[in-house]
Image: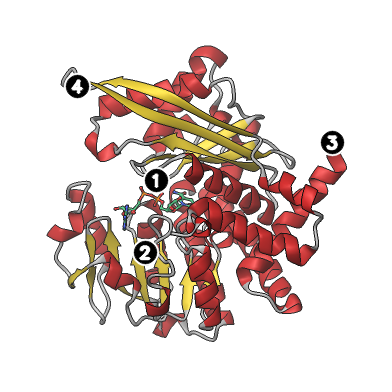
Amino acid sequence: MSGQSTPRGSCEQFLDRALNKLQIEPELGHLLRACYREVRFELPLKRDDGSIALYNGYRVQHDQSRGPFKGGLRFHPDVDMDHFVALATLMTWKCALLNLPFGGAKGGVDCDPADLSERELEILTKRLVERIAMMIGPDRDIPAPDMGTGPREMAWIVDAYAHQNGFTPGVVTGKPIQLGGSLGRVEATGRGVAQITALAAKAAGIDLQEATVAIQGCGNVGSHAARFLAERGARIVAISDAGGGRHDQDGLDIDKLIEQLNEGQRRQAFKNCDGGGAISNKDLLELEVDILVPAAVGNVISAENARQIAAGLIVEAANMPVDCEADAILRERGKTIVPDILANAGGVTVSYLEWVQNRQRYQWDEQQVNAELEQRLETAWQSVSARAEAEAVDLRLAAYMIAVERVKQAVDMRGF
Ligand code: NAD
């Protein structure tokens, strides 16, 4: 694999395209690429069976020029420092693109949550907070859920942080409602994916009511994106989880499938579902559909399979599902890619609204949250599509140009 097709390499290449186009001087470009802080630490855990397991924990803070660091915590066996550097950097551009007053961060643990009991996960999460407590806080760095974490883990973080600092709900977002979470946060990323997909489809001349859609991943993002897209009239013909998926060219009954999935085991549950035929994750990506929504892990579309992707519109619901080599191939093939920093920004947008509500000590109703989300995503979409048209560039480059310009302005204003 070339260095560029690692998540970090891809991220740097996407940034380099924007830096070149904006003609930003190399020293400043270096500053915009570099991380403020990269921390790795040991997380020992006494397992329920009495054995000792040792995990690696990470927190990477990329940039805080526009506000406190913000970014999720991922529990997944395949993470390493390079992953988190790439994901933290992405958060900086995402927050800037949505005009949220945050910088970018990311972190997590190289564990497989499906292998751990609830008790083990609670201990591990609270130990993680012990290690990063001095780096986080509502005005420093605000974690959130990502792959393998959700409201339950955020509640444990609130508890662990409160022991030293008193009850501080604004230290994390994506919390349960009873602990200061925002209505609408759980669905926000998928809701945003569906909205942005609808806008991109319209711009590409695709009638969503007639469109076929394949979705890789059926976790928080994939399941809600599927539901909201189905609600908008799209025909979801395939959906998967880590163990493979279901496919029916006439359309799947998404609500029924998700219901079965919730009742099934946490891992490879689609294998036991009825509805459609079985399909592998590889074949799902290459299906003859109008719209492809990768909503699981990164780097699933690379130089290896980019020439086999049939969909005309690819909406990056996951972070970095398309690497930089595949991005170039797909652009050359005339495909439209809606970049992650726009497509999945609904999550961090409602995280911002949650943080605002925590500071106000006031809960908004769900309608207000959803209306604000919709308006912010619409504004971001309009600015990206207008910039892409004005500069005759693809949507990713346009989105990066807007984001990098905003961060550069903040860096310039604050001085060195
Ligand atoms: P999740 O843990 O809820 O779900 C992940 C899904 O991906 C599951 O269905 C899992 O079975 C599947 N999966 C795991 N490994 C896979 C593999 N190798 N191949 C195919 N499928 C696989 O995670 P999530 O919160 O839905 O996040 C999904 C993606 O969206 C991640 O890239 C994450 O960074 C990104 N994202 C999430 C949010 C959010 O609010 N949750 C916000 C922005 C971006």
* Residue type, label 4: Asp
Crowd band around label 4 with a 10 angstrom C-alpha radius: few (<14), some (14–19), many (20+): few
Query: How far is disc 3 from disc 1 in space, using C-alphas?
Result: 35 Å
Query: How far is disc 1 from disc 4 in space, using C-alphas?
Result: 23 Å
Query: How far is disc 2 from disc 4 in space, using C-alphas?
Result: 37 Å
Residue 416: mark in rendering: 3
| Callout 1: SS | loop
Does the CB distance between marks 1 and 4 fall below 8 Å?
no
Q: Which of label 2 and label 3 is nearer to you?
A: 3
Mark sitting earlier along the chain (2/4): 4
Q: What residue sits right under mark 4 in the picture?
A: 48
Q: Quadrant of residue 239?
A: bottom left
Mark sitting earlier along the chain (1/2): 1
* Residue type, label 1: Met
Crowd band around label 1 with a 10 angstrom C-alpha radius: few (<14), some (14–19), many (20+): some
Location of residue 77 in the rendering, given as x and y in whole percent from the top left corner: 33, 41
Q: Which of label 2 and label 4 is nearer to you?
A: 4
Location of residue 339 in the rendering, given as x and y in whole percent from the top left corner: 55, 64
The verdict on label 4 being within 8 Å of ligand 1 is no
* Residue type, label 3: Phe
The verdict on label 1 being within 8 Å of ligand 1 is yes
* Residue type, label 2: Arg
Q: What residue sits right under mark 2 in the picture?
A: 227
Q: Which of label 1 and label 2 is nearer to you?
A: 1
Is residue 175 something that shows in the picture? Answer: no
Q: What residue sits right under mark 1 in the picture?
A: 147
Relative to residue 268, is residue 375 drawn left or right? right
